[in-house]
Image (tube, rainbow, N blue to C red):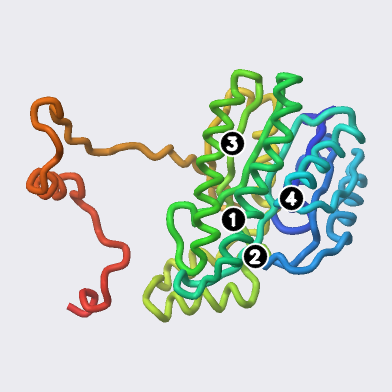
Amino acid sequence: MADRLKGKNAVVTGAGSGIGKAVALALAAEGANVVACDLGGSTDGKGASAEPANETAEECKKLGVQAVPAFGDVSDFKAAEGMIQACVDNFGRIDILCNVAGIDRARMIWNMSEEEWDQVIAVHLKGTFNMSKHACVKMRQQRYGRIVNTISEAWVGTVGHVNYGAAKGGIASLTYAIAWEMGRYGVTCNAICPRAATRMTMGPEVLEGYKKRVESGLWSQERYEEVTHVATPDYLAVIPAFLCSDEAAHINGCIFGAAGAFFSYWAPAHESVIFGRDWDKYGPWTWEEVAKCVPTLLKGYVNPAPPEEEKKK
């Protein structure tokens, strides 16, 4: 065990399996005490079990740190508060929060129910807010803290689970906002955009969905091979652990791609081409002006999903 996080106290959601478990163990390996939070349900949010959180806590203890399990639902505001408080009650304070918990209810938008939308948004986006809000109260008072959120490449567009993509996009925006609000108090907030083989990304039903995307023409075979040829979460777990360290105190409001094969930086969205005008002189935009600007604004643009009729031409 190294000591780069010795004396720090962490809360990790989704710690019962996959990326969350790998992050919890990476923090423990560097000396951090851990509250391993996991409701213990399936990838679609159904069911509950204490076993996953218990197992992760025990594995953390074997690395020489203190660890306790927690079984709350991150989408429940009071339960989230309880998980943050558990860190304070057991270890004295909270220094680190890693938001990893998530579920997926995959559907094309025309088949998605309101419940499937609400549940995924609740666990991912609201859950990240719930945990971060309660952690920020304490971190602001102590003027120190590290928050690492988890998004996905789906945040820039996805097929087959618009709820998941929308939630991850919301978490990206939330990450930037927390960073700007909390940075003055010595609290950083960053996010990882991981690519790893987990039960959510490589389960039988998920793989079948990937194959259907290739068959329907939504994905190329090369894209399928790129998405499915990934390492297990332990290959990337040190990246969020590093972001939780004092060595990363100057890193705030950043999103990093993380995988066994790469470590990358996602530049914030920005306007790339701008047409300026004197609105006092010319008044509201006209149809003709907009039509004239569009070809320059979209130079090099390719429609990612043209109508099937156009594909056949």
**Which sits earlier in the primary sequence, circle 1 or circle 4?**
4
Name the element at disc 3. strand
Say which amino acid is labelled 3: Asn
Residue indicated by mark 1: 121
Q: Quadrant of residue 55?
A: bottom right
Of circles 3 and 4, the one toward us is: 4
Asked if disc 2 and disc 4 are in contact, CB closer than 8 Å, the reply is no
Q: Decide if residue 280 is on the left or right side of residue 101.
A: left
**Which sits earlier in the primary sequence, circle 2 or circle 4?**
4
Can residue 200 be seen from the camera position used here?
yes
Nearer the observer, 144 or 131: 131
Disc assigned to residue 76: 4
Residue 195 picture location, percent across and down? 57, 55
Residue indicated by mark 2: 200
At 57% from the left and 49% from the top, the residue drawn is 151
Residue 186 picture location, percent across and down? 66, 20
Label 1 packing within 10 angstroms: few (<14), some (14-19), many (20+): many
Residue indicated by mark 3: 190
Residue 270 picture location, percent across and down? 35, 37
